[in-house]
Image (tube, helix red, strand yellow):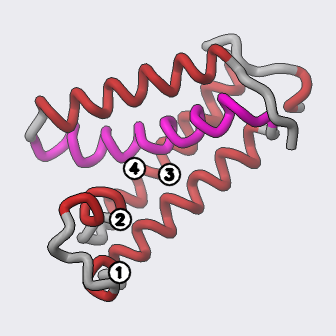
Amino acid sequence: MIFRFHKKYFALTILVFLIEVCIAMYVDDAIIRPYFGDTLVVLLLYYGIQSFFGIQPKIVAIGVLLFCYLIEIMQYFKLVNVLGLQESKLARIIIGSSFSWFDMIAYTLGFILILWLEKINIFGTFSTKHS
């Protein structure tokens, strides 16, 4: 693992974060907010990590996907309630409070999207150091 700052990944992190904030603030529907937002969170985490570390894209993408799955599994077991944080809005936002197989699918789609974007090098972020 190599620590380095990557401007393009950082710019993508900020862009995806702003899109997530706009979705959270202005979209209240049954598709974009819950599913597109969950797909984008995978990209947000991936780009955030790649902003500072020179790690092979597949490894980071798999790690992010597994982390998202773990969060969803914690929702299945109602971790917020187990920890006694059910009254904490922040805990419910970060950890979540309801399991959904559709969320797992959204995370998987985000993972696939990352692999595809890296393969086609659409943002010019892929370097030979990652191969």
Q: What residue do we see at 42% from left, 27% from top?
A: 16
Residue 62 in picture, x, y percent from top left: 67, 53
Question: Is residue 112 shown above or below 80?
Answer: above
Identify residue for label 1.
Answer: 79
User: Is residue 93 found left or right of 52 in the rendered image?
Assistant: left
Identify residue for label 4.
Answer: 106
C-alpha distance separating marks 1 and 4: 21 Å
Residue 122 in picture, x, y percent from top left: 62, 14
Q: Badge 2: few (under 14), some or many (20 or more) residues near its Cα, within 10 Å?
A: some
C-alpha distance separating marks 2 and 3: 18 Å
User: Is residue 105 found left or right of 56 in the rendered image?
Assistant: left
Q: Main secondary structure of the magenta part?
A: helix
Identify residue for label 2.
Answer: 95
Q: What residue do we see at 50% from left, 51% from top?
A: 108
User: Is residue 7 found left or right of 71 in the rendered image?
Assistant: right
Task: Report helix, strand or loop for mark 2.
Answer: loop
Contact? badges 1 and 2 (CB < 8 Å): yes
Query: In which quadrant of the rendered image does the N terminus lie?
Result: top right
Question: Is residue 126 shown above or below 3?
Answer: above
Numbered disc in front, either 1 or 3: 1
Q: What residue do we see at 54% from left, 17% from top?
A: 11
Residue type at the position of mark 1: Leu
Q: The magenta stretch spans which residues?
A: 29-54
